[in-house]
Image (cartoon, rainbow, N blue to C red):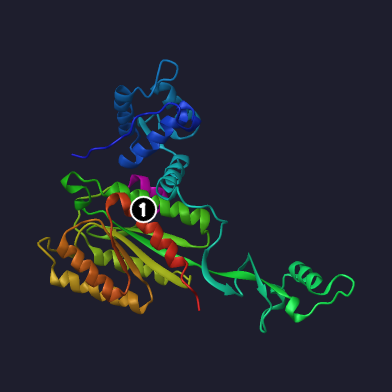
Amino acid sequence: MRGYHFSGFDPNQQGQTRFDQLLDLFMQLLTYTSGDVSEAMQWMNELDKQYALTDNEYGMGDFIDDLKQKGYITEDNERGEIKITPKTEQGIRKRSLDEIFGKLKKSRKGDHKTYKPGQGDEANSETRQFQFGDMLEQIDFTESIRTAQINHGIDSFQMQEDDLSIRETDFKSQTSTVLMIDISHSMILYGEDRITPAKKVAMALSELIKTRYPKDTLDIVVFGNDAWPIEVKDLPYLQVGPYHTNTVAGLELAMDILRRRKNPNKQIFMITDGKPTCLKIGKRYYKNSFGLDRKVVNRCMNLAAQCKKLKIPITTFMIATDPYLQQFVQEFTETNQGKAFFASLDKLGAFIFRDFESGKRKTVY
């Protein structure tokens, strides 16, 4: 049985209104309930009994009315269903971003900067002395005139090559990323919820790219017995199924997506907790859950090698501790020359962000 851990309710938290405080909790619960409003509200009522979230002045009914009036939920009277709106979907992504990447320093919108200065895309605040071969449009004339006045004085003003200052520019890299999420049944086995952290990371990453790297692309692929793409708006509703783990299908679909992308830099992130156990051969599923099947593993290794040839690094985030599975991931990573992190669930977001950012800040020669 799954369990959730909640901290005590602080009515004065950061000066928020009662509605805002309840909305934060409601958004978090929607992630756990895969967008099921009714189940989330049942949890809200149970938590209200335990922690006194509401009072006589503002009750849970008032909160539900506000959700409707403010456009967070909509009710289908004919079917008797209450659903979340696109506004709520975007709010969940934003809150996931704040939760996982909240400690980031803000920077201007754009692409990922590299460390190498030169004839790049956007000027930065750094200047240097003119060197032979620099472009004339890079000259900072205000700084150059100031330097000439200092060097020669105002009365005998002149400008020489040594007085010229160049405004540095940053190279920027555009990247196409495919995020693969394992939705096999083991993602909720043994009382451990692994799919919710994976969903939060996917939503946070999508919001990060949308707001800070708008020229990048992010595609999301889920894989169980088969693999298929999903839209960002579908992430809150993502659930595991009675599936095996067809890593091969996920990789093949990710590669097919990246072939169609024109960005020069491409990469695959894969979140998984288990071994590959399934292949699809024609219309038949080849399955083996007992250990590592050589036939399945070899197909995975072949795809890792193909991605290496296509210059598509694969970063695997392993959220299981089985030694023989970690050994498989290490061999898979060596074949691809990618990266692997053996992450705990609470550190998953930080690992993914660190790799996403560092991958963009590699030096371009």
Is residue 302 left or right of 27 when viewed as pictured? left
Pick the residue in front: 329 or 263.
329
> Can see residue 277?
no
Magenta stretch: dominant secondary structure: helix
| Image: 132 above or below 172 | below
Q: Point out the residue furthest to the left here.
A: 290
Residue 134 vs residue 227, the one in the foreground: 134
- The percent coordinates of residue 280 (x first, y second) are 20, 66
Relative to residue 35, is residue 278 depicted above or below?
below
Residue placed furthest toward the bottom: 132
Counting the numbered discs, the total is 1
Amino acid at dot 1: Gly
User: Which residue appears at 26% of the width and 58% of the height?
Assistant: 272
Crowd tier of the residue under label 1, counting other residues whose Cα lies within 10 Å: few below 14, some 14–19, many 20 or above: many
Question: Residue 226, position in %: x, y?
Answer: 25, 60
Q: Can residue 142 be seen in this view?
A: yes
Q: Is residue 102 above or below residue 144?
A: above
* Quadrant in which the N terminus appears: top left
Considering depth in this image, is 324 or 285 the residue closer to the camera?
A: 324
Where 356 falls versus 60 (above or below)? below
Q: Does the stretch in magenta take in 233?
A: yes
> Which residue is at 18% across, 48% downward?
189
Find the magenta span and give its range: 230-238
Circle 1 residue: 349
